[in-house]
Image: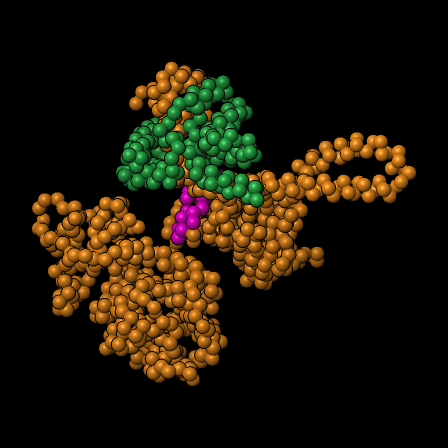
Chain colours: A orange, B green
Amino acid sequence: MDAVEKLIARYLDQRESLDDAEIAQLAAAAGESPEVARALKRQLVVEELLGQRLAVDRQGFEAQVEQRLHDIQCGQRQLAEQAAQLRQLAESQLEAMPGEVRRRRRYRWLISLAASMLLVAGAAYGYWNLRLVQPLATIVAVEGDVWRVDADRWKAMWASAANTEGSILGTMLGEVSAEADQIAATSTEPIMHGEGFLVGDGGRMQLQYADGTRVTVRGRTMVGFAARGWTFAKTVHLAEGQVTAKVAKQGGRGAMEFETASAVARVLGTELSLRANGRATRLDVYEGRVQLVRRADGKTALVQADEVGVATADELTVEPIQWPLFRDGLIARMDAGFDARPRIILPMQGETELPLVAHGLAWPGRNGALTLAGGGFTAEDAGRHLVDAIRRTRQWTLELLLEPKSLAVAESAALFALQSDDGTEALAITQFGSSLYLRLAGDAKPADSDDSSSLGRRIADLPEVRPYHLAIRFRDGELVVLLNGEQLPVQAGVSCDWERWSASRLVLGSAEADEHHWLGTISHLAIYNRYVVDDDLRRQAASAMRFFRRMTPQRVLVRAVPTSPPRIARRGRGESAPSLVVRDFRVLEEVVGKLSEARFTAAYWDVLDSQHAALLPAAEAERIFVLEPLADYPHVARQLDSTGESASDSPASSTAATHFVVEWQ
Amino acid sequence: MAATNTKLDFDAVLAETHARIRAYIAGMGIARHEVDDVAQEVYLEFYKSLEKMPEDLAPERWLKGIARNLCLNHIRRCARRGRLHHQALAEILARTESELESPGRVESLHVALDTCLRKLPPKSREILQLRYEQDLPSHSIADALGSTAEAIRIALFRIRNGLRDCIANSLARESA
C-alpha cells in the first residue's frame, strides 16, 4: 500500500485527521493522476453503499424526504393562515376607530410592510416555540398514582437524578404527593414539552403520540417528555424506573431518543423496554434495532430483537434476552438444557433449580427443546412449591411453547401436569386428536360439552403440525386461552377447588406410569401466580417463537420437498477430508430444492465441525440434512436401537468412533 | 390533478435514484454522516424545480447538477480547515466517473452488494459491521479486535476495493 493509498484510507476513516498539507497533497495527487482520483472516488462510493445498506439510522431516506416536504408544505400553509388572521385583526381594529383610520390610511402600506416583516420573524420564532404550545402526546390510560410536574420542576428533578448515584424516586414521590397543589394526571390530557411525571408504586401511565407511537410508564418511575431540534424529534428522559415503548417509524423527524443518566437509546421504529437508575441503563429490544450510546464516552452498541443492552460506567454489553421477558409473579421457568441438564427454576425460591429427570424415550436437545418421543420429564417437589404459590393468589398463568408431532392422537396423552404422588392432578393439559384439553381439580365439564368427561375442558384446536405458543390464565372462574398470541373465546364459570389443589411434582410429557405418550417437543415453560395481560402474553409469544425459529432454522425456514433418498456415506476416521463431519446426530429429515429463502446455519448448535458461521450461503446449498443432536443420552440410542430406528446414525456417546459424511450434490 | 401527477413522478424518481444520488454526493467527498442531509436538500430543490426541468433531460442528470452545486456550497460553508483544497478535491471528484454511479436499477446495485457481502470472509464482515452498522472509528474497531487502527484502515481499504470489483463484475454480468 503506497503513501497516497494510506492517505485515502485515512481520509475515508476521518476527514479531520488530515491536516491542511495532507489534504493539499491528496488533492494534488488526484488532480495529477486520474487513477488516484478514480481510486478515491471508488472508495467513497463503496463506503456510501455500505453505509446505506448497513447503518441503522440510514434506512428510511425516502420517508425522511417525504417528511421534509410535508413539513414545508404545512409550514407554508400555517404562515399563510397566520398572516391572514393578523391582517384581519389589524383591519378590524382600524375600522373600530374611524377618525384614526382616515389619518392612517395613507400609511397603511407602511404598516402592512412592517407587519409582514414582524410576521416572518415571529413565524420563525413561533415555529421554534411550537413545541412549547403544541401537545407532544396524549395520556390514554392512568392507573394508580401519577403526578404531573411542570417543566421547571422537572428540569431540577432530572438534573438531580443525573447527579445522584442512588435512588431519589422515594424522596421525590414523597415531596410531590405531599404538596397541596400537586396535579394528578388523568387520561385524555395532553403532555407538553418539558413536563415530567412521577408514577407511584403499582401505578401505570400510557401515552400516545400523533404518529401512533405508544409509551407505557411503569410503577416507581420518574420520566419527562420533550421535543428536540427543528424537527421536534421525540425525546423521553428516564430519570429512574421503567418505560416500554412501541415506536412507529420516525422518518424525517429523526430518531426518538430515550435518555437516562448513563445512556441514550436511539430508536427509528421498534419495540423496547428501558430501565434505569442513577448508575445503569438496561435496554430490552423486542423488535427492530436500537443504538445504545453510553453518555460518558459516546461508545455505542447495536441492540437487536431479543437482545438486552446494559450501559454502566464500566461496561456496555449486549446479550440475548432471557425468556420469559416478564418476571413479576413468575414462579417457575424451564431451562431446557443446552448443557444437557434440563431443569425447572423457581425464581421465588431464590432461583432454586430442580432437575427434570428423563424417563422413557425423552431427551433434551442442544437446540433448547425437550424431545418427547415416548416418555417424559419429571421435576420432583416442583409441584408442591407451585401449588403453594398459586393457592396464595388464587390466580395463575401458564405458558408453553410446544410442537406436536401429530394431529391424530388416538388416545388422550398428557403433555403437562402438576401431579400428586397418587397420580391425582391439580392441573393437566392433554392432547386428543388435534385438540388440547385442560383438567383442573374441581372443575366440572361444561354443560354443553360433548367431550368425554375424562378429557376435561377443550381449550384449543391445533390446525397443523407446527410450533404453538399456548398461554392459559385463570382467575375468578374465568379461563382465557391464547394460541400464538390470539385470544380464543373466554370460558366463564370454570370452577377450581383450591382445597383439592395439591401436587408434588411437575411432569412434562407422560408420567412413568402412563400408557399413552404425547409426541412432540416442548421448548419453553413459564408459570406465574398472577393474571398476565394479553399484551404481555403476545409479546412473550412473539419472543418465544423468534427464539424457537432461531434455534431450529432448517425445519422452520426451509420449504422444499425431498426428491431422493438421503445420500449419507459412512467413512472411518482418516479418510479423505469430507465437506462436513457429523457425529452424535441422527438424521431427521432431508430437504432438497431451491433454498433461496434460507441460510444454512446448522452449525448454530456449535457442534458441527466447530463451525460458528453459516456453512454455505443459501444459493449454493442444494441439500440440507436436518439433524438432531442426541447429546449424552445413551439410553435414547439404546431404545432407538430396539425400536428399529436408524440407530446406526446415533452412536451411544460422543466418544464413538463412527463418523458420517454428508455429501453435497 | 397536476400537483398529484407531479407528486407521483417525484416519488418514482426519488425511489429510483436516491441510492445513486447519495453515492454521488459521497463521491464528492461529503462526510458520511452529512450525506443524507445534503441529499435531502437536493431532493427538496428538485421538487421545487420540477417544472423548470427540461422534458428531454433524465431526472438523474438534473439531480446530479443540483447535487454538485449543493455539495460545493456545503464544502464552502462547512470546511473549517483547508477549504480551498477540499473544494478542489470535490471538483476533481465531480469530474471523475465511477462505474457504480452509472444509471441502472437500484435493486441491481443492492442485490450485487448483498451477494458480494456474503462472499466476504467472516473477519471482513465483522470489520464492516463494526464500521458501518455500529459506526465505530478505526481505533475503536482495533480495540475490539485486538488490532491497530492502521491495520483496520488498510483492511477496510482492501475490503472496499474488493467489493467494488465484485459489484462491478456482477453488474456487468447482469447487463450482458
Residue at horizontal 39%, vertical 57%?
A543
Question: In the rendered image, which quarter is residue A86 located in?
Answer: top right
Q: Look at the image and tell me whether residue A162 can be seen.
A: no
Q: Nearer the viewer, residue A2 or A331?
A: A2
- Residue B67 in percent (x, y) is at 49, 29
Question: In the rendered image, which quarter is residue A509 located in?
Answer: bottom left
- Residue A211 in percent (x, y) is at 55, 51
Q: For the stretch drawn in magenta, what is the main secondary structure? A: strand
User: Outermost residue toward the front?
Assistant: B56
Q: Nearer the viewer, residue A147 or A167?
A: A147
Question: In the rendered image, which quarter is residue A421 located in?
Answer: bottom left
Residue A237 in the image: above or below residue A6:
below
Residue A383 in the image: above or below residue A18:
below
**Residue extent of the magenta highlight:** A288-308
Residue A72 in the image: above or below residue A601:
above
Is A91 within the magenta?
no
Residue at horizontal 34%, vertical 40%?
B111
For the N terminus of chain A, the quadrant is top left
Q: Nearer the viewer, residue B13 or A71?
A: B13
> Along the horizontal axis of the image, is A282 left or right of A368?
right
Residue at horizontal 35%, vertical 39%?
B108
Residue at horizontal 38%, vertical 76%?
A458
Q: Look at the image and tell me whether residue A130 can be seen.
A: yes
The number of numbered discs placed on residues in the rendered structure image is: 0
- Residue B62 in percent (x, y) is at 48, 30
Residue B175 in the image: above or below residue A528:
above
